[in-house]
Amino acid sequence: MPEKIMEINPEKSTLTDRGAENTSTANLHGSDRRVEGISRSVRQVTEKSPWDRTGKLAYALKHLRLFYRFAVISWKRSTEYKFNFFLNNIQQIVTLFIYIYFWRIILNHIPQLQEWDFPTLTILTGFVFFNQSLMVVFWAMWTINRRIIKGDLDVFLVRPVSVLFAIIGQNLLIYRLFEASLGLAMIGVVLIRYHISVTLFKMVLALLIVFLGTYLIMMVTIFLQSLSFWLGRTNAFTELLQAGFLINRYPITIFPKLVIAFFTVFLPVIFIATYPTLVLVEFTVIRGLEVLGGELLIAGLWTYLVYQIWRRGIRRYENVGG
């Protein structure tokens, strides 16, 4: 039987191979497009900020709930040792009366510091205590530069919350709010004891100014702390800033105008106690609103500066890998 010779047609084979190759190439291109589409979708999802995913209101509410949780944890931690908690509160009361006694001694030798008499200076001390309490509650903002240098921000960057909020929130000293209530109580006692008539609106206005003044000081602190992204260790800035804050214990309006301008714009401690006191007992409502308006403008400026330097600093921090 003759053997069958299988002929291979090169042309047909080539066409077949080319067809198969084209089909494979098309499949590969299709797969690439699908993978690229999936990657784009994943990237779009991962690039969305929490504001895009949950909405502004939900994002803010989440942080409020977290703040409440942090506050509860802080309270439990600070009241774990009852005797120490009691001594801390006693120490704040003693410190307040030392301040008041200091002003009494000064005014025994100097009848009056311009418009500042003993009741007004006592109210000033009450606002100082109120602000110091809030600053100590959020004491962790003084540790930002150390966390930047040590690379501790990595822990906070992977969390779906604001980095600054996480740093400050988990280290609250909520028990120091007792000092704030002590300051407000002292202000109320002085108003009643010396028959100083104030309206409810002026009281609210003074509290708004001191709250916003505390926010301003926090912005200045965070701005200087954020310089560690570029300069490394900046403890000298922190020490200078804390030294500058000491002037808020005194009525700043007794200083020259240039000094007043510096402590109004660049280190705005005048809004912590001096202006709230004057708004409460000296200024008219219109003058008080003018002070609040100027404070809002300065707060907007510092907020913008902090936002810019923190955003650029975080990018730099990520580039160098912490």
Image (cartoon, rainbow, N blue to C red):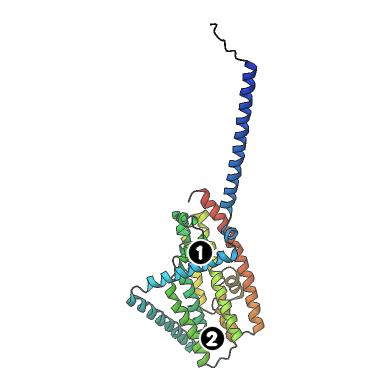
**Residue 270 visible from this viewpoint:** no
Which numbered disc covers residue 165? Answer: 1
Please say if 12 is above or below 318: above
Q: Along the line of sight, which residue is nearer the eye, 149 or 99?
A: 149
Q: Residue furthest front?
A: 1
Three-letter code for the amino acid on which mark 1 is drawn: Phe
Q: Helix, strand, or loop for circle 2?
A: helix
Residue 10 x %, y %: 62, 16
Q: Along the line of sight, which residue is nearer the eye, 196 or 117?
A: 196
Estimate the spatial distance between the alpha carbons at disc 2 and disc 1, rounded to whole Å. 36 Å
Please say if 23 is above or below 250: above
In the picture of the structure, the residue carrying the numbered disc 2 is 120
The answer to which of marks 2 and 1 sits earlier in the sequence is 2
Please say if 76 is above or below 279: above
Residue 298 quadrant: bottom right
> Which tag is nearer the camera, tag 2 or tag 1?
1
Q: Residue at x 62, y 23 (%)?
A: 16
**Residue 14 visible from this viewpoint:** yes
Three-letter code for the amino acid on which mark 2 is drawn: Thr
Residue 199 x %, y %: 60, 88
Residue 289 x %, y %: 65, 79
Q: Residues within 10 Å of mark 1 (few under 14, many from 20)?
A: some
Q: Residue at x 60, y 14 (%)?
A: 8
